[in-house]
């Protein structure tokens, strides 16, 4: 595809106007958004940038301030995939690791099995050394900051970062967050040198069916690019077999293989919208990426060498519908009467938790959190994951025939993770 840019006033096209099939996007300096309400009369050949463009509708809207309209016309031998890969490719790296201690008995742990052996563990028993590979990408070229997955550099004693131009740097692990499987690496650069940044996009703008592009180094094959679509926007870690993680994954059908972990997932405009993280080893065409909007705040904290603090309220819930509640209430010998509403039934509350302190009780049905209607335990976990420690969370619940609102102050999950206490329910 080629691009032509035009400085034009705002337009107000008629309702139902069809966009030009080759795609046009508004570009206001941030994330481009698809244009769906205007039509363009395309020439038979790609025009130069000063060619006129015919738009339907009024030439002004609101203040009439100018904006940039980017038109993409198909040309032979070019594509949006190629353009995206060329834009981001120089910022994608191969990460080689070495662990000086031998691997544990039985080989890979359950986590690495789930990821299909994503670190490509190759144990050299003669030298008591284990090698691994993964991918990553630059988010701050001046400071030498690179993002990858925590399981890529797990327990590594040596980290080497290689760019597409052949340059290799020794990396230092600045921070890791096991709960979200994110890690930050820093490479030391000469004062006058910087690295190319990968442009970050907006994962919240994605929709099911959107094009996505995976870039990485599967099986050590550098600069591999694969194309797919977004299959699901919200896939909880528990749904895919890793309940100990707290991530609301993007699901795609991009071909992701061992060695892709930590590499960028791009939108069709060549901006990073996710971090390729997981595959289902027992399936094809199913891969998972951490949304970049969620990863950003974690990466910002880890880049400063600080531990990531995760919020929690300390409840165990199950999804309930009015029908299930009614069935329970009519069964002989059933314990208690449940509110016949849809929501999240509180099954248990951790001792000393923020939920207990706020007055939440077992048997309550959580309806909303901070104004967001909840229909699954995964949605509750998502709200908590995006909350900060100490943040006040308004929880609307149903208790019997009464609807009440509780104010829960999110606690810090980090001490509980460190203590690894086993008696209480898993916090969400």
Image: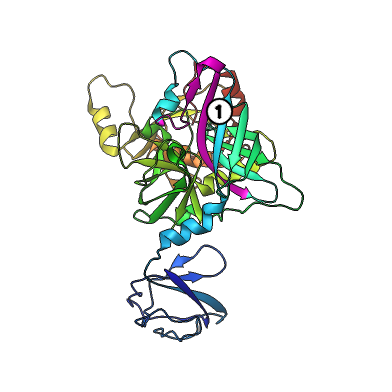
Is residue 278 in the magenta section?
Answer: no
How far across and down, in percent of the image, does residue 38 sit?
38, 77
Residue 76 vs residue 58, the one in the foreground: 76
State whether residue 397 appears in this view. no
> How many numbered callouts?
1
* Residue 89 spot, x, y in % from top left: 52, 53
Q: Position of residue 56 (x, y in %)?
A: 39, 84
**Relative to 173, is 277 on the left or the right?**
left
Residue 298 in the figure: left or right of residue 107: right
Q: Which residues are magenta?
A: 115-139
Q: Residue furthest right?
A: 191
SS at badge 1: loop
Examine the rendering and report whether any part of residue 389 can be seen: yes
Residue, far top: 105
For the point 57% across and 17% down, which residue is it? 101
- Name the foreground residue: 338 vs 1: 1
Residue 74 placement: quadrant: bottom left
Residue at screen point 33% across, 78% down? 17
Residue drawn at 55 percent across, 28 percent down = 154
Check disc 1 and report the residue beneath it. Answer: 154
Q: Is residue 282 left or right of residue 411?
A: left
Give above or below for 352 relative to 231.
above
Q: Which colour assignment does the render follow?
A: rainbow
Image coordinates of residue 140 in percent, x first then y, are: 65, 50
Count residues near mark 1 (Cα–Cα under 10 Å), then give few for <14, some for 14-19, many for 20+: some
């Amino acid at each position: 595809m080629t691009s032509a840019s035009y400085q034009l006033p705002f337009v107000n096209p008629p309702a139902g106007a069809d966009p030009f099939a080759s795609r046009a996007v508004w570009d206001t300096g941030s994330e481009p958004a698809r244009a769906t309400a205007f039509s363009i009369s395309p020439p038979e050949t790609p025009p130069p940038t000063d060619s006129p463009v015919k738009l339907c509708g009024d030439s002004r809207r609101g203040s009439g301030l100018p904006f940039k309209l980017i038109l993409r016309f198909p040309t032979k031998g070019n594509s949006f995939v190629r353009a995206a890969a060329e834009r981001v490719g120089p910022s994608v790296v191969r990460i080689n690791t070495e662990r000086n201690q031998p691997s544990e008995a039985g080989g890979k742990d359950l986590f690495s099995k789930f990821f299909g052996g994503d670190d490509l563990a190759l144990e050299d028993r003669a030298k008591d050394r284990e090698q691994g590979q993964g991918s990553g990408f630059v988010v701050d070229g001046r400071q030498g900051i690179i993002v990858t997955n925590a399981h890529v550099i797990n327990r590594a004693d040596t980290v080497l970062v290689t760019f597409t131009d052949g340059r290799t740097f020794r990396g230092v692990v600045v921070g890791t967050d096991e709960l979200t499987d994110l890690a930050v690496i820093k490479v030391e650069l000469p004062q006058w040198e910087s690295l190319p940044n990968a442009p970050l996009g907006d994962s919240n703008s994605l929709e099911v069916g959107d094009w996505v592009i995976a870039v990485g180094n599967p099986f050590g094959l550098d600069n591999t690019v694969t194309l797919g679509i977004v299959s699901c926007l919200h896939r909880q870690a528990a749904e895919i077999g890793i309940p100990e993680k707290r991530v609301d994954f993007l699901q795609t059908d991009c071909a992701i293989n061992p060695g892709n972990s930590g590499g960028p997932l791009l939108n069709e405009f060549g901006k990073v919208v996710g971090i390729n993280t997981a595959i289902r080893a027992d399936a094809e065409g199913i891969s998972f990426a951490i949304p970049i909007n969620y990863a950003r705040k974690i990466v910002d904290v880890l880049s400063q060498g600080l531990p990531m603090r995760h919020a929690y309220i300390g409840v165990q819930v199950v999804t309930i519908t009015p029908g299930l509640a009614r069935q329970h209430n009519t069964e002989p010998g059933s314990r208690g009467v449940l509110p016949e509403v849809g929501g999240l039934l509180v099954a248990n509350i951790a001792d000393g938790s923020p939920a207990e302190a706020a007055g939440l009780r077992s048997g309550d049905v959580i309806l909303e959190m901070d104004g967001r209607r909840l229909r699954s335990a995964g949605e509750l976990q998502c709200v908590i994951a995006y909350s900060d420690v100490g943040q006040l969370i308004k929880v609307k619940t149903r208790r019997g025939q009464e609807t009440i609102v509780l104010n829960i102050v999110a606690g810090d999950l980090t001490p509980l993770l460190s203590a690894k206490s086993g008696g209480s329910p898993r916090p969400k």
